[in-house]
Image: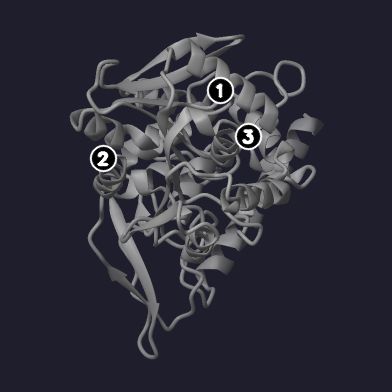
Amino acid sequence: MAESRVMASSVQQVQVQLAEVRRSVASSKWVAGTGLGPGAHVVHVPARRRAGSLVVASSEGGEAKKDPRRPSEGIFSFVTDNDSSRNAIQLPNAPAMDGNTGQMIAQIENKGRDYGSYVRAGEFRWWVRETGTADARNGTVVFLHGAPTQSYSYRVVLAQMAKEGYHCYAPDWIGFGFSEKPQPEYDFSYTEDAYHEELDKLIAKLDIPSPFYLVTQGFIVGSYGLTWALKNPSRVKKLVAMNTPLTPSAPLPGIFQQLRFPLVGEFTCQNAILPERFVEAGSPYVLELDDADVYRLPYLDSSDPGFSLLAAARKAPLKDLTSRIAEGFASPSWTVPTTVAWGVSDKHLPKSEAENFVKSNPSVLKAAMLDGAGHLPQEDWPEKVVEALTRFFY
């Protein structure tokens, strides 16, 4: 009985603290979710493949206008603008709208499997999306995603590229999406060399003829796609880099900084809405609910995806990686035609990354700026990505 009273008292204390935080946030001078003061003005703009879109601009007078789709001020108002994401949060006095985690998994477990199947290459099972056929008239394209996302981001691009006459593959990297999540250190090292080795095995298993077109995007494993190309220039017909760190001056998003801190990383990596938060933080758009479900799904039923992401983030030699990328592509020995297709509304990486990069080897490196797209152009505006790819590959 004494233990029960102590537990009840602790719960009451937590609830009181939560209530105080809610009151504090509600009375704050800042507009929830924007980081702007009371002079901010929220303007609605049309969404592009997303449920909603927000552009925030400051103004001198008047009170801030709130988007009705935003969460009301509260302890989690800063998390995301997405109703689906808020459903994943459940606290005393703030229950999730659609029940517990088990119910959520049951509702979404079959989502996000577009064009995909499992392929065993070497010791591990990869989830690989495929469109088109081996006899496609325009050749084969391999699409590689970045951390902490998955190949699902390419789903629309894959479908449209197949219609344009290409045979397309988009795998989930080991440790990401629906691919196998081997235990760090014991089963897989999550190093750059290990990822290159496993990618070689997958390409061999899929019997992808060389040279092929390669498209890579994003942080860490996305960068490994570029360093793989530097190691294997004869196997790459043409290369496209989309919104990925290209120089040592590239900023590192807070999520990766947190993952590299002891203890903080262990906590951060188990946040089921981390991937969708990252996607939305790098874009002017809000994910559609069904899409947010897919990015969250792997993190809901196991801790393995989080620890895989943690290992990949901590093993990545970030400064050395971007230095090698910048130097490798600036070298006169790099002669593979390369385009940097850049979403100019990227909030993680500035447009100057692409501009400075292509100046280092202008006879080989070209830029294609994608207006309206953010950090994941393939998610934000796939039609523009397809247009840029087909024009370059033709």
**Residues under labels 1 and 2: Cα distance?**
26 Å
x, y (%) of residue 167?
30, 24
x, y (%) of residue 54?
34, 64
Give neighbour class at mark 2: few <14, some 14-19, many 20+ (Cα, 10 Å): few
**Residue farthest bottom in this picture:** 61
Task: Report if the CB atoms under discs 1 and 2 are less than 8 Å apart.
Answer: no
- Give the side of residue 134 with respect to residue 24, left or right: left
What amino acid type is highlighted by mark number 1? Leu
Which residue bears the numbered disc 3? Answer: 309
- Give the side of residue 16 with respect to residue 292, left or right: right
- Give the side of residue 360 with respect to residue 8, left or right: left
Q: Nearer the viewer, mark 1 or mark 3?
A: 1
14 or 216: nearer the viewer: 216
Residue at 46% x, 44% y: name it: 276
**Residues under labels 2 and 3: Cα distance?**
36 Å
What amino acid type is highlighted by mark number 3? Leu
Task: Report if the CB atoms under discs 1 and 3 are less than 8 Å apart.
Answer: no
**Residue farthest front in this picture:** 332
Which residue bears the numbered disc 2? Answer: 394
